[in-house]
Amino acid sequence: MNLAEALLQALKAHGARELFGIPGDFALPFFKVIEGTGILPLYTLSHEPGVGFAADAAARYRGGLGVAVVTYGAGAFNMVNAVAGAYAEKSPVVVISGAPGAEERRRGLLLHHQAKTLDSQLRVFGEVSCDQVVLDDAARAPADIARVLRRCLEDSRPVYIELPRDMVGAECATVAAAPPSPVDADAVAACADEIMERLGRARRPMVMVGVELRRYRLEDKVTLLARRLGLPVATSFMGRGLLADRHAPLIGTYMGLAGDAAVTEAVEESDALLLLGVIISDTNFGVSARHVDMRGAIVAAERQVRLGFHVYEDVPLADLIDALLVRAEGRQETPPPPRVPAPRGLGADDAPIEPLDIAMAVNDTFDAHGRMPIAADMGDCLFVAMDIRHTPMVAPGYYATMGFGVPAGLGLQAASGERPLILVGDGAFQMTGWELGNCRRHGWDPIVIVFNNAGWEMLRTFQPDSAYNDLERWNFAAIAETLGGRGRRVATRRELGEAMAAAVAERGRFQVIEVMLSRGAISPALERFAAALARLNRPPREA
Ligand code: S1T
Ligand code: MG
């Protein structure tokens, strides 16, 4: 077997189910093997940021490997931002880049696509990945590949594989999966005992869940654990969409001053807040009404558990959850509380559309036709998503990059086979919305709601008096038609409801519903978020 086939077989054996990529001359030999062997299906897109976002979304949705394959230099550097977002938000993306061969490296010429040195790219990706390897030795390659793929899955972070083009055909042994990293069973037991003791004597214990639950496929187990322990559960802002489909005792999403007051009170007044797989970030905790006391919390993430002033190392979240389940064995499961109903019943009238109307239209559609997985971009569309019924969702809730939404929705459909709903602002659509032009050849048909408020509205909430936040009103509905989809511009609530029904009814073509919003119209959630930030960032009053 050659090295390229060994790598592809290893990716498949570790759970990868597709590749996203754009070829280039340094990667052509590898792409030829991809096409010739058919070991994994290849979806090419138009621009490498989209390749990275699609691979990231596939990884998040599956709780397993997403794979992005690009050429050296111009291709790989184009994708750094998407991989940085995957790193920040703990998404297990495998980046594979073609590269110059040994002979051409020695020739002493500056090579095309080269930046500062031939190793610059490896150094740059070292900053957005948890492990890296250059496959320049066929004898070492199987062990190197096994090592980085294990790290990718165990750390749930991107890894970087550089594949020199003269190594693709090198004879290579099959990749044997590396054994799981050692776990300190005694530490797991001691930690679980201490947590149970802490929860047992607390007045208001509760759980907050974050993205690691999806990454390590722990949603069912945590639902069972919360029910056995009788603990209410909130998701972090980034964890929105977690525990959807499950009968978890879910009380909502924590957004501090910007969120539901009852959820905020429950989280911030808890005297034993168990954080499972939550990223301790400013977007998850930055707008806390009262600073959440992390010292008093139990923070289980990144293969360690912090309790008060001490840390248990080498305690993977999955092992901890299993140990806690054993200790909660036999307890009477508490039924989930009644769900806070999401806003529904959009009026069929000629009133102009407000952002919250979009959530109502989506909830009505989900009620009538079933839920869809959601890919949301950065902007007010992400805040509107907080008022949409709980459903699996991928969004850049912490790293907060624009451009994620459309390619991520395509990655969702490739990975899940389900028709996704994409929420995207006009500014973000201008960045990567064009990837919709690839839907027809890949058989994708997402429904895309474009929030056209003719501006970078979220920035306007931070800096209202800047004119540069105004954008021209592009005609995204017309653009959709030219890209092979169906486009509808809607300005009233009646038109929005009708467009949603028509979009759901047509399969086989992507649907763009361009919602005309007035400048300055923002969702209640974004309004609260901006007000909270302003309040928290207000300079301390002079004494
Ligand atoms: N560039 C990229 C790649 N990501 C970003 N997050 C930004 C710039 C900064 C930024 C925001 S929100 C925002 C920008 C430019 C405006 C988004 O405009 P649009 O997509 O139309 O959505 P909406 O009008 O609903 O705001 C965040 C704060 O960093
Ligand atoms: Mg906008």
Image: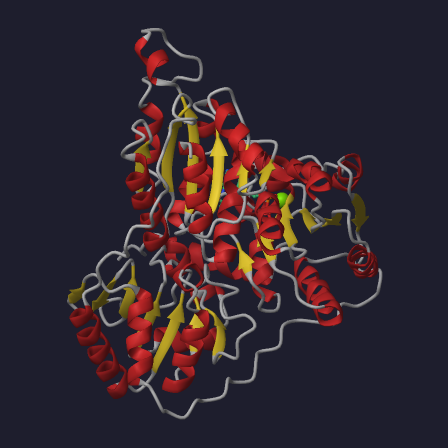
Say left or right for 267 vs 199. Answer: right
Query: Where residue 25 appears, x then y in whole percent?
Result: 50, 19
Q: Which quarter of the rendered image does ligand 1 occupy?
A: top right
Query: Where residue 203 appears, x then y in whole percent?
Result: 30, 87
| Residue shown at the point (48%, 64%) measured from the top left | 258
Depth check, front residue: 120 or 307: 120
| Residue shown at the point (36%, 85%) measured from the top left | 229
Say left or right for 476 vs 22. Answer: right
The answer to whether one can see residue 203 in this image is yes
Depth check, front residue: 49 or 130: 130
Query: Where residue 441 appears, x then y in whole percent?
Result: 71, 38
Say left or right for 10 vs 530. Answer: left
- Is the N terminus in the top left, top right, bottom left or bottom right quadrant? top left
Position of 397 relative to 316 (above/below): above
Query: Where residue 301 appears, x then y in whole percent?
Result: 30, 62
- Is the C terminus in the top left, top right, bottom left or bottom right quadrant? bottom left
